[in-house]
Structures are given as structure tokens and as C-alpha cells.
Image (spheres, grey):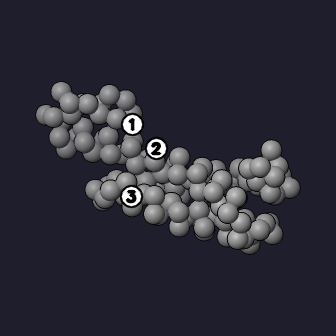
Amino acid sequence: MQGILYEEASVLQFFFITCVIGGWTAWRTGKSVAEGWQSYTTVVIYTLLLGAAIRFVHYALFGATLLTAHYYLVDTIILLLFSTASYRFYRTGQMTTKYYWLYEKASPFSWKAK
């Protein structure tokens, strides 16, 4: 997997920076965008910027390549999964709480009309 998903010497470095730190930050990003009633496009834009920041952390701490499209896309896709899940989770809560007479939860990530 080294060379495909990450370029660091250990998968733990990739997991900690991208999945733990970046994933938590992406989750909070999706939550804040949903709570601000902003569109999903805002989540994507913020996650693209977050992907660049996480790429910089890999570069600064572990000497990874800074400007590489491959690893930037890998990091950003993983972060986009976290931020999208968070956005849908909190938006579902908003829709079913604020408009309880119209919608009910279908799953943790979606709602349906009553």
C-alpha cells in the first residue's frame, strides 16, 4: 500500500495525520457548515483547502512531497468522506428537529417526508 495511499515510512503516520487529525477536522468542518445552513458546495470548497493543509502537515513533519496531485487527491478524498458524513448527519438532525411536522429520520444520514 505504501506508494499508493501514502508515501511515509509507516502507515501509522498516514493514519494519524490524515485519518485522525484530518478526519476530526473534516468532521468539524461538515458540522459547522451544516449548522450555518450553508450548501454542500461550501463543504467541498473547505475540504479542498483542508486537503492542502493536511498535505502541508505531511510535508512539514515527515518530509513528504508537498506539491503532488496523487497524494493530495488521496488525502482530500478521505477528508471529503468525513466531512460529507458529518454534513449529512447534522443536516438530518436539523431537518427533523426544525421541521418535525414535515420530516422524520430515515437513517442517521437522511430524512423522509412524513
Quarter holding the N terminus is: top right
Give the distance between the C-alpha atoms of the residues marked 3 and 2, in whole angstroms. 14 Å
* Precedes in sequence: disc 3 or disc 2: 3
Q: Is residue 77 above or below residue 107?
A: below
**Label 2: element kind:** helix
Q: Is disc 3 surrounded by few (<14), some (14 to 19) or many (20+) residues within 10 Å?
A: few
**Residue 57 in view of the camera:** no
Seen in the image, is 23 located left or right of residue 88? right
Point out the residue furthest to the front here.
Answer: 69
Position in image of residue 7 (x %, y %): 80, 57
**Label 1: which residue?**
109
Q: Amino acid at mark 2?
A: Ala
Q: Amino acid at mark 1?
A: Phe
**Label 3: which residue?**
41
Q: Amino acid at mark 3?
A: Thr
**Label 2: which residue?**
85
Position in image of residue 21 (x %, y %): 62, 56
